[in-house]
Image (cartoon, helix red, strand yellow):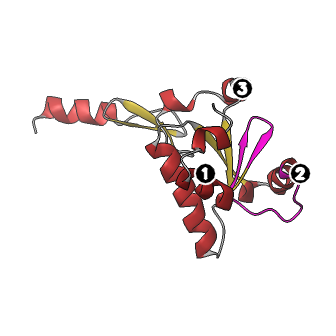
Amino acid sequence: MNKIQEHARRDSMKGTEGERADFGRVYDVKSLRPKEERGNSYQHRAMACLTVYSTSVTGSREIKSQQSEVTRILDGKNIKYNLVDISQDNALREEMRAKSGNPKAIPPQIFNGDQYCGDYELFVEAVEQNTLQEFLKLA
């Protein structure tokens, strides 16, 4: 690699604080999604996009596995969603529980705007029955 190529590569890796550029795409460091896909939160709420409540801090392999499966399936079907980490703030956990109507709800919990779609078990059932669009209230 010559010096010009090295400078071009280094320049392509620069981004603003909280972002990382990688080969021409700028990623948000928190969500690890390309910035152009992320949009701003007002725009997502206005479009009544999906919200998946999850946690980055858990000792439960089951919860980690369930969260991974939900996001993997949504990503695989190119369905955009906001990932809300309830471990960052207790108010987010209480918000998730209030919106779901279950004071003991655990992540992952899925919402379309303010409409409750369901939890992991209902999500998997919808995937197996090929009714995911209806479950997510996208159809």
Q: Secondary structure at mark 2?
A: helix
Q: Position of residue 11 (x, y in %)?
A: 31, 31
Q: What residue would you read off at disc 1?
A: 126
**C-alpha span from label 3 to label 2:** 21 Å
Camera-side residue of 24 and 66: 66
Residue at horizontal 64 percent and vertical 32 percent from the top: 138
Reply yes or no: does residue 110 show up in magenta: yes
Residue at horizontal 49 percent and vertical 40 percent from the top: 33
In the figure, is residue 2 to the left or right of 79?
left
Residue farthest along the front direction in this orientation: 129
Between disc 1 and disc 3, whose residue precedes?
3
| Amino acid bearing label 3 | Tyr
Q: What residue would you read off at disc 3?
A: 42
**CB atoms at circles 3 and 2 under 8 Å apart?**
no
Q: What residue would you read off at disc 2?
A: 98
Residue at horizontal 56 percent and vertical 54 percent from the top: 70
Between disc 2 and disc 1, whose residue precedes?
2
Camera-side residue of 105 and 31: 105
User: Residue 134's mark?
Assistant: none
